């Protein structure tokens, strides 16, 4: 088990992801249009998206993600009124993570919030799956997808979420208060056409 230091690019928002087991296997690259639109809305596509439009995300329960500094700079946007809550550091537009509502015990931590990118592979373990590959900007080469199994990943993440729910790891959350309200009012930003 290891901890991973987190920071926005300018350093005003800092956090920690705790108790990470590299074998937990909940790291995924998402190529969906909404993840691409989120990076674009923050004008961070060049720094966040890979060559195929993918976003590297580590799924963990909210109680293991701490914001230690700059909580008031943690802002939220949604691409539609019912969309995911997408969190970012308002000081420098660094994407932090994605959540569903307060009741769903998972945060998708976005790689851009990792303080030292060289720590990602040894701490988080390998990418286990590539999701929404049909929305990738170009066709993914087989070397990238060969070792990833979507069905194995889905079984794993559903199992993890059940454990996180049953063991109460959904709370506290850096993103929702005790009554389940987002700590920062979400701004609706429609994706650019
Ligand atoms: Zn910042
Ligand atoms: Zn996505």
Image (cartoon, rainbow, N blue to C red):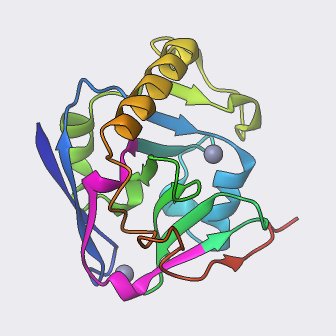
Residue 133 screen position, x and y as percent: 68, 30
Residue 50 screen position, x and y as percent: 53, 46
What residue sits 37% from the left and 35% below the top? 166
Q: Is residue 50 left or right of residue 8?
A: right
Q: In the rendered view, would you say 191 is above or below 184? A: above
Would residue 73 be seen by someone viewing this image from the given angle? Answer: yes
Q: In the rendered view, would you say 144 is above or below 20? A: above
Q: Foreground: 177 or 93?
A: 177
Q: Is 130 colored magenta in this rendering? A: no
Span colored in magenta:
59-76
Q: Is residue 141 left or right of residue 69?
A: right
Question: Which quadrant holds residue 115?
Answer: bottom left
Q: Is residue 117 left or right of residue 192?
A: left
Would residue 92 be seen by someone viewing this image from the given angle? Answer: no
Q: Which quarter holds ligand 2?
A: top right
Residue 138 screen position, x and y as percent: 72, 35
Q: Residue furthest left?
A: 1
What residue sits 41% from the left and 70% below the top? 178
Q: Foreground: 140 or 156?
A: 156
Q: In the rendered view, would you say 71 is above or below 30? A: below
What residue sits 63% from the left and 26% below the top? 140
Q: Foreground: 55 or 154?
A: 154
Residue 187 screen position, x and y as percent: 67, 80
Image quadrant for the N terminus?
top left
């Amino acid at each position: 088990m290891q901890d991973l230091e987190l920071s926005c690019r300018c350093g005003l928002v800092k956090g920690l992801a705790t108790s990470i087991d590299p074998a937990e296997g909940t790291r995924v690259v998402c190529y969906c249009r909404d993840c691409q639109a989120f990076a674009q809305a923050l004008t961070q596509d060049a720094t966040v998206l890979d060559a195929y439009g993918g976003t590297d995300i580590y799924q963990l329960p909210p109680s293991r993600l701490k914001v230690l500094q700059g909580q008031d700079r943690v802002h939220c946007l949604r691409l539609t009124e019912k969309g995911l809550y997408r969190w970012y550091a308002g000081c420098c537009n660094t994407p932090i993570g994605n959540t569903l509502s307060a009741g769903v015990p998972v945060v998708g931590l976005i790689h851009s919030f990792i303080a030292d990118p060289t720590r990602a592979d040894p701490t988080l373990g390998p990418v286990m799956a590539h999701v929404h590959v049909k929305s990738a900007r170009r066709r993914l080469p087989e070397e990238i997808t060969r070792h990833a199994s979507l069905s194995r990943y889905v079984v794993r993440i559903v199992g993890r979420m059940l454990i996180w729910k049953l063991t109460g790891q959904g709370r506290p959350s850096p993103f929702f208060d005790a009554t389940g309200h987002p700590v920062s009012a979400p701004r609706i930003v429609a994706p650019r056409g």
